[in-house]
Image (cartoon, grey):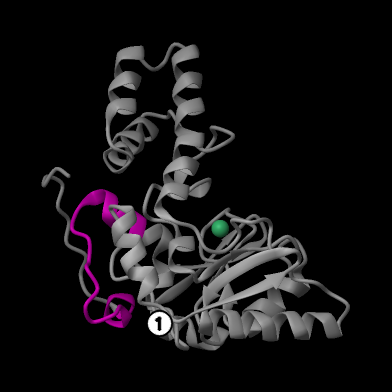
């Protein structure tokens, strides 16, 4: 990664609540990802968040995942694997939902744990059609797209952000940044086993039950996505997290 564009974030409540050995990014891409996905890193209640914003290889992800206390359950027909604390609270939320005739089920086989290769494949599934679209529109030169395709998934991230800064958005519907559609390789919260994509996300009663058990929405406009933060709602501001409202939903993001 280029060493240009270094920006120092000054200390604040959020920064103070990061793990002591957290590897704070100094580059523009890392800092943007910290702002967009960073609520996870101040998770409490027995959660062990990653010490880095970006895992750079499958080996790094595997080493981290192996160090965790994990729990696997069959929920809604899918094997769901999460950190033990996250699973315990999810099961409590499911039990409470049931009392009110509600269900909380995973969106699919990849709704919880993912590996590095999964995040690379998801990234490519957005980047490739987006590049093709902007070439077709006559806005992006074929040669520039070719250069981007030849980069490592990790190095593509800053180049995609550059295109987006020129209006060539790469989300699924091409109307907004790719970060609201899919996480860059090695940055998905699902790598931490503290995230779950939920079918019933549209039901505010389900969102309330989940938040009562430490599960909150932390990625703007990623509607099915919930993150285990392991605290009650009134503790979130003390962790340096702010409320962001978008399209009738409340998301919790680092106050940076
Ligand atoms: Zn998700």
Which quadrant of the picture is home to ligand 1?
A: bottom right
Asked where in the image residue 234 lies, by quadrant, the reply is: bottom right
Q: What element carries label 1?
A: helix
Q: Look at the image and tell me in which quarter the N terminus lies.
A: top left
Q: Mark 1 points at which residue?
A: 239
Q: Can residue 170 be seen in this view?
A: no
| Image spot of residue 253 (x, y percent) | 45, 67
Asked where in the image residue 39 lies, by quadrant, the reply is: bottom left
- Left/right of residue 117 with respect to residue 245 in the rendered view: left
Q: Is residue 133 above or below residue 234?
A: above
Tell me which residue sits at (56%, 70%) in the image.
Answer: 81
Write down the region rendered in magenta.
13-34
| Image spot of residue 19 (x, y percent) | 29, 80
Q: Look at the image and tell me in which quarter the C terminus lies.
A: bottom left
**Looking at the image, which is closer to me, 13 or 158?**
158
| Image spot of residue 8 (x, y percent) | 17, 62
- Left/right of residue 14 with respect to residue 118 in the rendered view: left
Residue 20 lies within the magenta run? yes
């Amino acid at each position: 990664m280029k060493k240009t564009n270094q920006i120092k974030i000054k200390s604040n409540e959020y920064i103070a609540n990061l793990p002591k050995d957290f590897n704070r990014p100094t580059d523009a891409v890392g800092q943007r990802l910290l702002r967009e996905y960073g609520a996870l890193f101040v998770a409490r209640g027995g959660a062990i968040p990653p010490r880095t914003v970006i895992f750079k290889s499958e080996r790094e992800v595997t080493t981290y995942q192996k160090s965790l206390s994990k729990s696997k359950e069959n929920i809604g027909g899918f094997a769901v694997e999460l950190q033990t604390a996250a699973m315990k609270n999810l099961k409590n939320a499911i039990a409470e939902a049931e009392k009110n005739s509600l269900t909380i089920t995973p969106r699919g086989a990849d709704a919880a744990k993912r590996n590095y290769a999964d995040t690379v494949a998801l990234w490519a599934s957005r980047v490739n059609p987006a590049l093709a679209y902007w070439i077709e529109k006559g806005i992006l030169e074929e040669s520039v797209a070719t250069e981007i395709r030849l980069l490592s998934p990790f190095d593509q991230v800053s180049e995609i952000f550059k295109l987006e800064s020129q209006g060539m958005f790469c989300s699924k519907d091409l109307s907004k940044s790719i970060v609201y559609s899919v996480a860059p390789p090695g940055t998905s919260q699902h790598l931490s086993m503290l995230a779950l994509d939920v079918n019933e996300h549209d039901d505010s009663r389900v969102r309330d039950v989940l938040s009562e058990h430490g599960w909150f929405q932390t990625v703007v406009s990623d509607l099915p996505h919930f993150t285990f933060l392991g605290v009650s709602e009134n503790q979130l501001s003390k962790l340096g997290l702010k409320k962001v409202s978008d399209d009738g939903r409340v998301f919790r993001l680092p106050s940076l």
